[in-house]
Image (cartoon, rainbow, N blue to C red):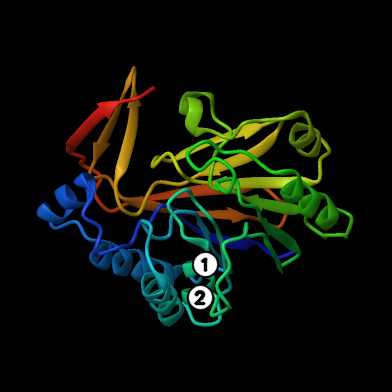
């Protein structure tokens, strides 16, 4: 089987009208998504990915026009490359459906599936129930189990916003017995996620997990506080013919500067 190249973006938080403290500080530093996204796309054009995955928080509580902007920018740079998204705790599902997917608006949870080069990609909505804390509703796991009944030559790759990560504490995905059984089944090839604004690679019950940097701002977990910095990045994950994988991390601001901190419970 052929190799596959996966462009993995997360936590873009695009909303030029957002007046939150963090966004205001970033604007003062001139660090705008409108500048960072084109830099990312220029590299991706050269790498010619087979699929683009965006693992949540495409906008920061944005409207349909903000989602439309992201779709237009990515599609213009990477025409004919499929894009699959998952929803984050700052996404507005009705606006996403209207602006990004060009569908009728709906506030319900977003689940989706597509196949590329023998891999089945399944997007689940881990942010729908509780937002900041990740959890899968029964209907999400019903959707996944139904997908797994159908054959996929190279297995299933799962997208969700929240990582399975102890260090993330309440911001991680709450694991339950039903989801752990699915991960132990051998039917899941990989997990892709974001939410924590940092790049991490590990395994969950032997399943590789790829957590991407944010394309807007970095965040580090230091004892009892969250430390925000001007790190911004994305990654490219490749699976070769044998199924072995490799991660390439791209940082747009590798020399980070802390600009905001707050207590982390």
Point out which mark residue 98 bears: 2
Q: Is residue 164 left or right of residue 206?
A: left
* Residue 30 coordinates in the image, percent (x, y): 13, 58
Image coordinates of residue 67 in percent, x first then y, are 42, 70
Image coords of residue 93 (percent x, y): 52, 62
Residue occupying image coordinates x 47% and y 60% = 92
Compare residues 34 and 177 and report the one nearer the observer.
177
Mark 1: few, some, or many residues within 10 Å (few <14, many ≥20)?
A: some
Quadrant of the image occupied by residue 225: top left
Horizontal side, residue 137 vs residue 193: left or right:
right
Q: Tell me: residue 29, above or below residue 172.
A: below
For the residue pair 231 and 141, the one nearer the viewer reads as 141
On screen, residue 169 above or below 50: above
Q: Position of residue 128 (x, y in %)?
A: 58, 49
What's the residue at 55%, 81% (across, down)?
A: 80
Q: For mark 1, what is the residue?
A: 94
SS for callout 2: helix
Q: Residue at x 27, y 53 (%)?
A: 252
């Amino acid at each position: 089987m052929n190799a596959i190249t996966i462009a993995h973006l997360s936590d873009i938080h695009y909303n030029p009208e957002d007046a939150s403290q963090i966004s205001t500080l970033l604007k003062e530093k001139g660090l705008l998504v409108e500048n960072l996204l084109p830099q990312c796309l220029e590299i991706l054009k050269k790498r010619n990915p087979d699929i683009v995955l965006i693992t949540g928080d495409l906008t920061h509580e944005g409207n349909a026009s903000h989602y439309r902007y992201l779709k237009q920018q990515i599609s213009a740079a990477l025409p004919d490359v499929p894009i699959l998204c998952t929803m984050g705790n700052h996404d507005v599902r009705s606006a996403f459906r209207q602006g990004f997917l060009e569908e009728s608006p709906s506030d319900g949870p977003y689940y989706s599936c597509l196949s590329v080069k023998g891999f089945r990609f399944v997007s689940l909505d881990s942010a729908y129930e509780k937002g900041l804390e990740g959890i899968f509703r029964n209907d999400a796991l019903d959707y996944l189990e139904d997908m797994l009944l159908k054959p996929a030559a190279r297995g299933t790759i799962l997208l969700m916003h929240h990582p399975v990560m102890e260090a993330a504490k309440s911001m991680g995905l709450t694991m339950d017995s039903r989801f752990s059984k699915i991960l132990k089944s051998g039917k899941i090839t990989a997990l892709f996620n974001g939410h924590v604004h940092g790049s991490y690679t590990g395994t969950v019950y032997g399943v590789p997990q790829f957590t991407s940097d944010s394309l807007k701002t970095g965040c580090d977990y230091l004892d009892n506080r969250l430390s925000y910095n001007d790190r911004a990045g994305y990654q490219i994950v490749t699976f070769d013919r044998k199924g072995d994988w490799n991660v390439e991390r791209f940082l747009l601001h590798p020399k980070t500067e802390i600009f905001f901190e707050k207590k982390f419970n």
